[in-house]
Amino acid sequence: MEKPRLYVIGASHANRIYQALKRIPQEEYSIINHTIPGAKWKNIVFPNPAEVKSSDRIIIQCLGNDLFPAEDQFWLCGSRHLHFQKINPNILQKLTQLKGKINRYQALIIILDLVPRLACCSVHEDRRLITEQNQVNGKLKHELTEAPNTIVLNTASLAGGINSHLYKDPVHYKPRIYKKIAEQLLTKYCKNLD
């Protein structure tokens, strides 16, 4: 009997989750990689809906690396923090497109919201990026929770919070954190819910 498939879709965070899932011993799923590190929204590849069965699972951690447009101005402040002068998230069109894509699947869809970026530091008190990220995650949850067969999870909660010791750089978690996220996805959310 063919095992159900667990598709992982997205850019660099999704790729790190995929790599962590592949290292976890499990027999329940065939894990399928649909990740492209550094991908922008238009480059993210979704599986053919005709090939996805209701027993499969789809993990999506994406809105692409162009969510915060190129005109956003930022610089590194220390080794792990970003300091933004201008923030203009570009989400509404992407949410509409994502909703259209996920509505084509019968499988359970697990959407991971944005991984918080380490913005600012003790030198710079402007915390706008955190506020913007929270607003984007709120819109994502509001818009996609009503989609059929879809759950939206808070990535920071799965990771254990927003603390600089969890991060390898201003954008990505350390490998052990992706492993923790992957383990939770397998044990709590990907179980056969049919």
Image (cartoon, rainbow, N blue to C red):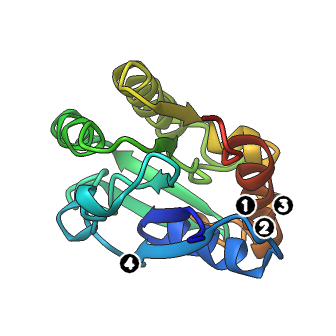
Q: Which residue is mark 4?
A: 36
What is the residue that sits farthest to the front in this orientation? 1
Residue 52 found in image quarter: bottom left
- Amino acid bearing label 4: Ile
Q: Secondary structure at mark 3?
A: helix
* Nearest to N terminus: mark 3 or mark 4: 4
- Residue sitting at x 67%, y 50%: 121
Q: Which mark is residue 179?
A: 2
Residue tagged by mark 1? 182
Q: Is residue 115 above or below residue 161?
A: below
The image shows residue 22 at horizontal and vertical percentages of: 69, 79
- Residue at (53%, 65%) from the top-left corner? 5
Percent x, y for residue 185?
A: 70, 51
- Label 1's element? helix
- Chain-order first, disc 2 or disc 3: 3
Q: Single out the mark in the foreground, 1 or 3.
A: 1
Q: Which mark is residue 165?
A: 3
- Mark 4 and mark 1 in contact? Answer it, CB < 8 Å: no
Q: Are marks 2 and 1 in contact (CB under 8 Å)?
A: yes
Kind of residue sitting beneath label 1: Ala
Give the amino acid type for the residue marked by disc 3 in the picture.
His
Callout 2, which amino acid? Lys
CA gap, disc 4 to disc 1?
18 Å
Percent position (x, y) of residue 38? 37, 76
